Image (cartoon, helix red, strand yellow):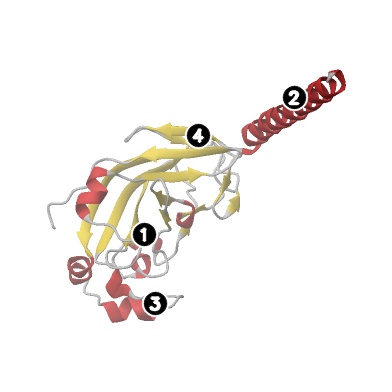
Amino acid sequence: MIKSRKLRLRTIFALLIAFAVIVSSVQIYRVNHTQDLATYQAKQIVYNAGENISLTDENYFFSGKVNLSGYQMKITSTKLISTKDFLKQYKASYQDLEARSMTDTYFDEYDLIYLVDADFQNTNKDRSHAEAIVLDDFLLTWTDNYLAPATDTINTIPDFNPQLKGNSAFAIQSDKTFHVTIPYLIPTTSTEKYTVKEILKDPPKLLIGQYPEEIYAKLPKPDTTDL
């Protein structure tokens, strides 16, 4: 009877030790895993709409690491317009977009265009070797999705961003403000589709820098008068 009781006590004791080891292991994993996330997760910096944003040489952008120290940007306005009306305004067609596109894109799935107006300045005293700002670096982002600018299609339409002459990058070598409009084709009939109502309810932000800080800019409410 005594041996049986001792056996039960030893068994219970062994189970308690095993349980303690498991709990301890889980806790160690949680601590280490949390530390890893804290180490590798980029800190988020969010600017309000209309704020001056200083670009730096510290951040990695969508196209890589570029020294943009001295550059400032300010988002002045945004606009939502139907693709059909936009093309009519610039005397272009869906066929023009297909001819300009570098990918096999079904443009009839993109019934909306989101336009982001931004002013850029170079505040450096020596602007003779200014690095180029690449429009593809500025991603339109929601919580679980992002859109890259339509630089190979919309941006190459004549009279749209005429100062860029179809290019998607520019360097500022004067003290003058350089204005550009960054275009985004919005999917409206595909799997990941958006409606005007959804965009107004859950407005996107502009992702500027990606690492070591994720730099976002809130966007002004889009003008929808042409819809």
- Read off the residue under disc 4: 44
Give the side of residue 164 with respect to residue 210, left or right.
left
Mark 2 vs mark 3, CA separation in Å: 69 Å
Which of discs 1 and 4 lies nearer the camera? The answer is 4
- Read off the residue under disc 2: 16
**Label 3 element class:** helix
Query: In the rendered view, would you say 17 is above or below 82?
Result: above
Q: Are marks 2 and 3 in contact (CB under 8 Å)?
A: no
Across and down, in percent, residue 39 comes to 66, 34
What's the amino acid at mark 3? Arg
Which of discs 4 and 2 lies nearer the camera? The answer is 2
What's the amino acid at mark 2? Leu
What's the amino acid at mark 4? Gln
Across and down, in percent, residue 214 comes to 52, 39
Q: Is residue 55 visible?
A: no
Which of discs 1 and 2 lies nearer the camera? The answer is 2
What's the amino acid at mark 1? Gln
Mark 3 vs mark 1, CA separation in Å: 19 Å
Q: Are marks 1 and 2 in contact (CB under 8 Å)?
A: no
**Label 1 element class:** helix
Across and down, in percent, residue 193 comes to 31, 61
* Closest to the observer, 182 or 169: 182
- Read off the residue under disc 3: 100
Q: Which mark is residue 163?
A: 1
**Which badge, 4 or 2, is on the more N-terminal residue?**
2
Q: Is residue 94 visible?
A: yes
Query: In the rendered view, would you say 127 is above or below 193?
Result: above
**Label 2 element class:** helix
Query: In the rendered view, would you say 53 is above or below 197?
Result: above
